[in-house]
Image: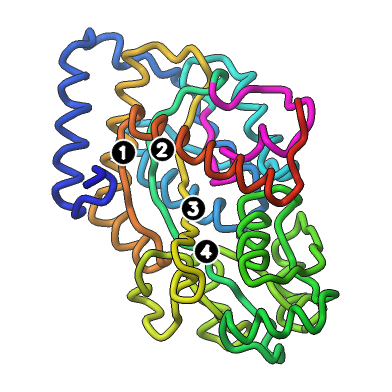
Amino acid sequence: MNRLTLPLARRAALALAGVATAAVLAPAAAQDALPTREIRLMVGFSPGSNTDLLARVLAEALQPRLKRTVRVENRPGAGGGIATEAVTRAVPDGATLGFAAPSLAIAQHVIGNLPYDPRADLTWISIVASTPVALLAAPNYPARDLRSLGEALRARPDTRCGTPGAGTFLHLATVLITRALGARCEAVHYVDLDEAMVDLQTGRIQLYANLLPVSLAMIREGRARALAVGSRERHPLMPEIPTVAETIPGLELVGWFSLVGPRGLPEALMTRLERAAVEAALSDVTVKRLYALGVEPVGSTGAELAATLRAADATWGEAARAAGLTTTN
């Protein structure tokens, strides 16, 4: 069993024990090496997006643990790449961190001349949380599930699918689903999530693959209809919605959200940030808030984050190539 699939309580104990052991090896004075100014948490998507919502939950939980103000700074664009580049160029003193969306593992496969290397120019600190994709349809769209969606798309290949940007995690998730159904749709890329959700509600676009934090309210209020959810099993907050794998066996679409820093963070500072992230993600208050959003708290170590992203790199690199989106850097 992979450690990231362990029950929450056991996972929390293991994570905290691991970082506590590392902390013993670091000089006590060095663990307090954070600058006295506020910490900027860079987010590559607009306010109100899935990434932004989860970053704000983490920022609030980190503040008492780091004894610093943690301020979310939104720099949307390039599928999260503008914010990521800002992190890679920051001084490695802990004052600038990044809240990485799932698209981070995809960027090098779909963006030409990427100005940073996600694998070499960042310090991996912790996977904070994960949440599945929900494939949303406009309220008046005729499809009710993935099987009828395949029929509708084959009949109307000009169906418009919204995405948060070309080559992003959610764009490739849409491509994987539609290709597996033997169909396609016309991608419409947005920077402004609010605009995309209004267009979905009014039928200007017909489909949008989104993550649960933003999707739940729309589904509950009837502003969109969920056709499928990308988790391995039906989600407890939406047990009536089938999984993608029930129609497309083996296809699981879950996004990871991670705390990262610039390359070169001192080991003792990395240890302190890792421990704070684990404690923040698995605290009672955070767990309750995340579950209410349809999000699974994780609280991994930095080594586990690196291993997870290596696996994701291969998976999404192959998906990008299959979708014809690969750009050679």
- The amino acid marked with disc number 2 is Thr
The residue that label 3 is drawn on is 255
Question: Helix, strand, or loop for circle 4?
Answer: strand
Q: Earlier in the sequence, mark 2 or mark 1?
A: 1
Q: Position of residue 120 (x, y in %)?
A: 55, 18
Quadrant position of residue 15: top left
Label 2 and label 1: CA atoms lie apart by 10 Å
Comparing marks 2 and 1, which lies closer to the viewer?
2
Quarter of the view holding residue 135: bottom right
Looking at the rendering, the stretch of residues picked out in magenta corresponds to 97-119
Spot occupied by residue 223 in the image (x, y as percentages of width and height)? 63, 84
The residue that mark 2 highlights is 308
Q: Secondary structure at mark 3?
A: strand
Q: Does residue 323 sit above or below 305 in this rendering?
A: below
Above or below, 6 relative to 312:
below
Of residues 145 and 305, the one drawn nearer to the viewer in this rendering: 145
Tag in front: 2 or 3:
2
